[in-house]
Image (cartoon, grey):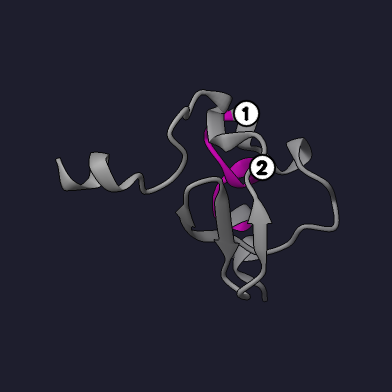
């Protein structure tokens, strides 16, 4: 069983926030995001994507911004 399938068995739609639910993304994307940097995220299978929606669509700095992480 894939990691996203295991998650959906435990959490409806795979997320507690509707805007991040499985039905909000293209159906051909499988797996879970395991890390991010800037505007890019990587899934657990190593696939890299541009995180166009940036989670809740409010992250102006992107993922893992160096100055924020340092603070």
Q: Position of residue 41 (x, y in %)?
A: 56, 55
Left or right relative to 2: residue 57: left
Residue stretch rendered in magenta on the structure: 9-17
Q: Quadrant of the C terminus?
A: top left
In front here: 17 or 58? 58
Q: Could you tell me which residue is drawn at 85 percent across and 51 percent down?
A: 27
Looking at marks 1 and 2 on the same chain, the residue that comes earlier in the sequence is marked by 2
**Furthest residue toward top:** 58
Depth check: give the residue in front, 13 or 31: 31
Residue sticking out furthest to the left? 71
Label 1 Cα crowd, 10 Å radius (few <14 / some 14-19 / many 20+):
few
- Whole-percent x, y for residue 37 in the image: 46, 53
Residue 59 rendering spot, x and y as whole percentages: 47, 29
Find numbered disc 1 in the image and state the secondary structure of the residue it sits on: helix
Q: Is residue 3 magenta?
A: no
Res 13 label: 2
Q: Circles 1 and 2: CB distance less than 8 Å?
A: yes
Whether residue 24 sits left or right of residue 70 in the image: it is right
Residue 34 is marked as none
Give the structural element (helix, strand or loop) at label 2.
Answer: helix
- Residue 57 placement, left or right of 68: right
Residue drawn 60% across the image and 68% down it: 3
Question: 39 above or below 54?
Answer: below
The residue where tag 1 is placed is: 18
């Amino acid at each position: 069983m894939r990691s996203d399938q295991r998650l959906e068995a435990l959490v409806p739609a795979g997320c507690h926030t509707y805007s991040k639910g499985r039905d909000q993304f293209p159906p051909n994307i499988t797996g879970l995001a395991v890390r991010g940097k800037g505007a890019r995220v990587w899934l657990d299978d190593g696939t890299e994507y541009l995180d166009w929606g940036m989670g809740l669509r409010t992250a102006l700095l992107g993922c893992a911004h160096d100055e924020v992480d340092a603070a």
